[in-house]
Amino acid sequence: MKTLLIVYHSMTDGTRQMSAAAADGAGSEAATVRTTLLHASQAGPTDLLGADAYLFATPENLASMSGLMKDFFDRSYYAALDRLNGRPFATMICAGSDGRNAARQIERIATGWRLKQVAEALIVCTQAQTPEQILRTKQIGPLDRARCAELGAALAAGLSLGVF
Ligand SMILES: Cc1cc2nc3c(=O)[nH]c(=O)nc-3n(C[C@H](O)[C@H](O)[C@H](O)COP(=O)(O)O)c2cc1C
């Protein structure tokens, strides 16, 4: 049995819905791939060491990954350094209008861990611009949830087939 670890943080629920959709998609390989979905505050180096592939999902806040997501990487980085080399990863970003900087930050950390990026960053823009829209609970639409489910399914299928 292989393990896909999904670590996420979400302030207004968008990234959580994206992560749940990805976990659902990964369920298509449930016979050979176990999917573990963890909030960033609950995840740490032991979870990383025990997994075979990773999906990191975060909101973009102030042109950065969210603070709690950064905290997860800060707590995990050195304990996992040189122990994850070559394992596959992908990212999902929930953003108001951009998202690229959060993706870039995670990709840099993953480079330090010598992980292998196996998909382009999946960015969902919620178009939230005003303070009211930004603070409102998000509803990720069916097309975007389907994109997340496809990414989860592709990661799980790749793990199952050993193609990464
Ligand atoms: C403090 C704060 C800063 C934000 N900064 C950005 C930003 O730099 N770029 C962007 O595209 N969206 C930004 N947003 C919008 C969020 O990325 C957007 O609301 C997203 O849906 C949040 O994901 P979540 O629902 O998982 O929390 C910001 C939101 C907050 C609360």
Image: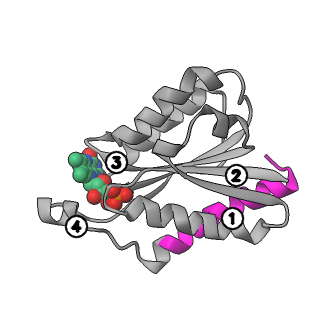
- Please say if the residues under marks 2 and 1 sit with CB atoms less than 8 Å apart: yes
Please state which amino acid type lies under the numbered disc 3.
Answer: Glu
The verdict on label 4 being within 8 Å of ligand 1 is no
Residue at 32 percent across and 55 percent down: it is 11
Provide the residue designation for mark 3: 60
Disc with the residue nearer the chain's start (1 vs 4): 1
Please state which amino acid type lies under the numbered disc 4.
Answer: Arg
Disc with the residue nearer the chain's start (3 vs 2): 2
Q: Nearer the viewer, residue 100 or 30?
A: 30
Using the numbered discs, state the Cα–Cα distance from disc 1 to disc 4 in whole angstroms.
28 Å
- In the rendered structure, the answer to whether residue 87 lies left or right of residue 61 reads right
Query: What is the secondary structure assignment of the residue under circle 2?
Result: strand
- 52 magenta-colored: no
Provide the residue designation for mark 2: 4
The verdict on label 3 being within 8 Å of ligand 1 is yes
The magenta segment: 145-164
Using the numbered discs, state the Cα–Cα distance from disc 2 to disc 1 in whole angstroms.
8 Å
Provide the residue designation for mark 4: 136
